[in-house]
Image (tube, coloured by chain):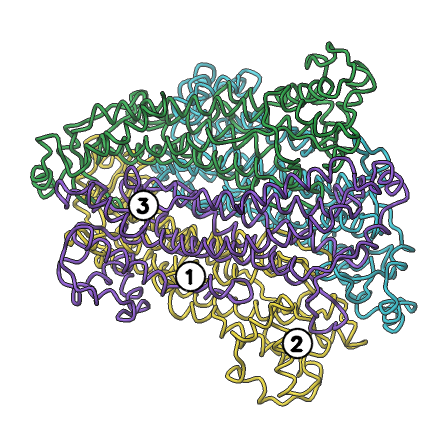
Chain colours: A green, B cyan, C yellow, D purple
Amino acid sequence: MTTFERLFVPAALASAVSDASWLAAMLRAEQALGRASGVELDEAAFDPALYDIEQLTEEGRAEGNPVPALVRALRERAGPEAHRGATSQDILDTAAMLVARDAVVLVRQELDGAAAESARLAAAHRSTPAAARTLLQQAVPTTFGYRAALWLSGLLDARDRLAALRFPAQLGGAAGTLAAFGSEGLAIAARFAAELGLDEPIAPWHTNRAPVADLGAALRAVASACGKIGLDVVLLSQPEVGEVSEGAGGGSSTMPHKRNPARAVLARSCARLAHANASVLAAGEYEEERAAGAWQAEWPALSGALAYAGGAAEAARESLAGLEIDAERMRANMSDDLWTEARTFGIEGEYLGAAGELVDRILARYEGSRA
Amino acid sequence: MTTFERLFVPAALASAVSDASWLAAMLRAEQALGRASGVELDEAAFDPALYDIEQLTEEGRAEGNPVPALVRALRERAGPEAHRGATSQDILDTAAMLVARDAVVLVRQELDGAAAESARLAAAHRSTPAAARTLLQQAVPTTFGYRAALWLSGLLDARDRLAALRFPAQLGGAAGTLAAFGSEGLAIAARFAAELGLDEPIAPWHTNRAPVADLGAALRAVASACGKIGLDVVLLSQPEVGEVSEGAGGGSSTMPHKRNPARAVLARSCARLAHANASVLAAGEYEEERAAGAWQAEWPALSGALAYAGGAAEAARESLAGLEIDAERMRANMSDDLWTEARTFGIEGEYLGAAGELVDRILARYEGSRA
Amino acid sequence: MTTFERLFVPAALASAVSDASWLAAMLRAEQALGRASGVELDEAAFDPALYDIEQLTEEGRAEGNPVPALVRALRERAGPEAHRGATSQDILDTAAMLVARDAVVLVRQELDGAAAESARLAAAHRSTPAAARTLLQQAVPTTFGYRAALWLSGLLDARDRLAALRFPAQLGGAAGTLAAFGSEGLAIAARFAAELGLDEPIAPWHTNRAPVADLGAALRAVASACGKIGLDVVLLSQPEVGEVSEGAGGGSSTMPHKRNPARAVLARSCARLAHANASVLAAGEYEEERAAGAWQAEWPALSGALAYAGGAAEAARESLAGLEIDAERMRANMSDDLWTEARTFGIEGEYLGAAGELVDRILARYEGSRA
Amino acid sequence: MTTFERLFVPAALASAVSDASWLAAMLRAEQALGRASGVELDEAAFDPALYDIEQLTEEGRAEGNPVPALVRALRERAGPEAHRGATSQDILDTAAMLVARDAVVLVRQELDGAAAESARLAAAHRSTPAAARTLLQQAVPTTFGYRAALWLSGLLDARDRLAALRFPAQLGGAAGTLAAFGSEGLAIAARFAAELGLDEPIAPWHTNRAPVADLGAALRAVASACGKIGLDVVLLSQPEVGEVSEGAGGGSSTMPHKRNPARAVLARSCARLAHANASVLAAGEYEEERAAGAWQAEWPALSGALAYAGGAAEAARESLAGLEIDAERMRANMSDDLWTEARTFGIEGEYLGAAGELVDRILARYEGSRA
């Protein structure tokens, strides 16, 4: 029911957070559990193509999540020992981390692309004078390169937050005690995480949702950094300003002469949707050993936050990649006072306050982050 | 990418807010426009089966919305006069109202179902004594029927808000002036609304989003009323309380003895998701004659708010429909003090404070609302 | 701890939602309860000056709300029968409605002021041509008067929502049954409401928070309508656009030449803060007969939503009141195409599409609303 | 206008985020600026007692922030060179970091207190068997100590996020270029940060609000961890469960026999209010070189998020500090099946699954965090 999904979300990312991906991730979790606990299971049974996620979801209404139905179907194929020792939340939380880890890779690629474009613009326009605007009033001179460098700075902050994310496996059994594994619980939990290449947490996190809340915060950072770029591009694209335009800017259904900053607009709308979805991820209303509502709401919200954050990054990247820069217009827009000031502060000697040095600093940070 | 959609959302409602429904609604809007403005168009061209919404959406990235691509495809079939005088927002806003009107009917059906169940419980347990709990501490006696009547009261409030909704057509042309229709603009706008059975607004609402914000507020009311029921059912289903249980309560993947209040849990998670989506619908950040981000974000958010509000209502209805009431346990749970108090206040004479009269009042309101 | 309160909130409104006002309202509720239930109380005891709300609040931590401490202090002065039959929530909810009713009057005054300014601008500039902007691109011609009329339209929608609000008294006793009043409960509840000039609800609403949620929705509508004006004024005030300016526009600490649209900016920031506070008012997580957290959070959030919504309205009113309109610049900003189009559509004959008629319609609605 | 502030917020924290603290911080920023830029200023002029923040705030409406008025008053006393080279945002952002840094110390103290209480309970009840509850249904056995250890785990996660916060100074001049300082800009910015003991950022962050968004995310983590404790205490305090009670639990205005979990309730309401305030801090809608609304809204929201997060921590600490644990009731509440299971899994040998080892791991993390 996600309206106009491909308008907002990169196809690869939509696929990465699709029900098919969740199903595959749940099966990987079940398979890893079998291996970690030394249970003999038919490996062929873990092929997602054998299962109908829509039917499992429908069936799942009876239990409030799709795992029990999946386990019933799985046991028929893999053997009755499948899922032994685990609870639905183990499988779903672990699947969520697998889905999120894969999706974050895609979000980062888009973010890296947007960063590369920002860095390119920052370097190319390090000495291109432009009016700085505060409260949308012309303030003092700056350079377009410095503005682009500050976009880059925001993107790098967001990337740092993505890079700092941990993706812990979840294995706790019915209530986090690992009791069904006897004395082997912690060892199995460690092997389970290792099988999946996930982090081994100090303890199960079934009602302590820091990994999910951190994902929400990092995706908000992505959304904010990309939404900011979208906002600035929209503003600079105004015909009365005319300092940039999206080369592939969209026409309209009635006004073919228009060159709408369509990608910048999409970045902004994706950012809003990412924030709204992320707001579900940090609530903290988790009752005792398993939440009766707050946990379940995380699944669509996590997919949504990942998808729209990535959509914001894709749209920002595309907007910047095709951006046409009108340096003469930047110059012409500056009031006489500003132009005088810009010359005083040394624009001709490629220096405007510390703008140039700050561009260099931010570019150095960018280069460092790629090393 | 909506994760586990059928777990949360009734199938009919998911369909009502699907891209197929949005496409059909856009085509209905285009068709009504043609009729209203007296343009000759091939009526066969408005069959949704002729169009591929995924492809139109993909194409729509260039312009930031799917309408220009749809109009190009439509004009090939219907004739070059299709869409004349309108702008993308006219079509999308009108489609949004058509989609929402249909979806709200389904939400109301679920809500009515939940109301009927609440009314049944209120009447049947008008004199069933139970402990009232404030801050989850036993407070004074009440009746289970009165608690159910208060659920009903919340549902009726929500239904009133749905019933008060207006679904205005949107037709303003490129910037709301209807200029392309010459002197016929207002007359065409009136016919356009009439063709679709939508309300005729005083003026276009392209940047004055009251119809959308009101939808958001009404759907929040649905979510809150149903989430409240879910919360109470979860609490009353605790084994230490044991006053109700979901007859079809879900098992768990590891603990077959459990009878989880699965529907109540789903009601709560849907309520959360409905609130998050609705939060996108009331923001008010609409630039001049068309918003550059806030408008576009409404489409998925509106679908989501409708779907999850309806999901909350469906889950609440199902939870109540199968609810087993343990009146003896309600009696047994009351502390001696409370039981003494209940007898003092007349429970045996079918009177406990004004609880009985209040049940009657609320039931009368319910009956009145169905007349 | 409200930072820079007077920057954002009208002084009268800040006072209306202050702790002093809450205290006075709680005392009025207690007094009305005494009168309604025929209890002999010393009327002099209800003077707010006799009580220290800070101390009562501090004391209230032990019980989670300030009413028990107030009741102890009140009984010493008014007599032991004070508060008989009521619970803390009766007093606080009723006080909330009294506070809100008074504050809404002030919000409406500011909103009316903003509406009057919008109406003035709509009438004065009914035929002032200007570029309409969609996605911040010049689209087609419009009139400045029509844009102002659409602001007015949003304000009138918001006013309608304020006008539709009900302010019900709350009296239910410990758990909503009115049991402590014996057979007199409903009669006393009716007299209680009448004493205070509040609506008499069909039933207590202690866990059915429609009155509070409706307040939230209406205040969101105010915030959105005023935030929209703020946004447009900021955009139109850009020096590159220059179509309006705040006459009293603020300087800056470093750039005395700037004329910042300070009031428009404040309207936008207030709108954001109003939305954030209102989001607390609609959550629906109210356990059984009294919520253990969601109810208590309403008090600061309600005050905040009222204060910032009113602040948005005040700032929008002030922004519009001092707004200087540069009709020549509006004309000059229009591209040649747009100007040709404007003449074609009849601007010289005071007609541009239906813009003029739509202005008249909206002004007629405005006049009707004042009758 | 913060309603019932002392009910929710520790007095020291309310003071730390008060306007008086913001004023003092703004003056410290101005003073540090003078020192860093080698300007001769009368140091006596920086005494906050010389200024009336309410009047400055009132005056600030003209410019949209209180700094210009403060600078005018400051220059009269300190000399005309005060504030040279800076812009209002430099002073306010730096003040925000100073205020936040001081307030975070207080939040951490409350959080540490809650952590100490959780650790105490985890150690003391490492082998106290209790029913684990999932979806509020009894699931399998656990220990109360393990539940308390998981509370501790959440608190430690939140503390880590607080500890990771950076508090960068902000100095960029009118638009972030430091131009007014000539070639000394970066050196002055470094000295400015050093004077205040704040971090020196790579570049100004006037429209790249990561420091503020990170604060929001960390305070959300505090709110969630403490709200979770509040929720569990409320649930375990139900008379039908009766496993814990707040020793100083509050009475009610009508029911002196009740022992309400008042602190737990306050923790939950504070958590909600903290989340709502924090939602304003991450939005990313910052126009070009200074936001026209989103920035200004941060001031009250930051104060609110700090205050209510700290309030949640205080309330959680107090709730746990006075918590009476009824181990016999925990045992008695366990169903026969659970008790059999608990014995099987070794509760008598102080072992229940991995619960004991997991308690030890979490306590080791706690001890490590204090080293």
Q: In the rendered view, would you say A369 is above or below B204?
A: above
Dividing the picture into quarters, in which one does residue C190 lie? bottom right
Q: Where residue C270 sits: x, y (%)?
A: 40, 55
Dividing the picture into quarters, in which one does residue D25 lie? bottom left
Report the front residue among C342 and B326: B326
- Type of amino acid under label 1: Ala
Report the front residue among B81 and B235: B235
Quadrant where the N terminus of chain A sits is top right
Q: Are marks 3 and 1 in contact (CB under 8 Å)?
A: no
Q: Chain of mark 1?
A: D
Q: Where residue A149 sits: x, y (%)?
A: 27, 31
Q: Are marks 2 and 1 in contact (CB under 8 Å)?
A: no
Q: Which residue is mark 2?
A: C192
Q: Which residue is mark 3?
A: D291
Report the front residue among D325 and C49: D325
Q: Is residue B87 visible?
A: no
Q: Where residue A56 sits: x, y (%)?
A: 73, 24
In the image: residue C95, left or right of residue A67: left
Residue situated furthest top in the rendering: A44
Q: Residues within 10 Å of mark 1 (few under 14, many from 20)?
A: many
- Type of amino acid under label 3: Ala
- Type of amino acid under label 2: Phe
Residue situated furthest front in the rendering: D371
Q: Which mark is first along the chain, 1 or 3?
A: 1
- Mark 2–mark 1 Cα distance, whole angstroms, equals 42 Å
Q: Residues within 10 Å of mark 2 (few under 14, many from 20)?
A: many
Image disc number at residue D16: 1
Q: Is residue B168 visible?
A: yes
- Secondary structure beneath dot 2 equals helix
Q: Where residue D202 sits: x, y (%)?
A: 29, 37
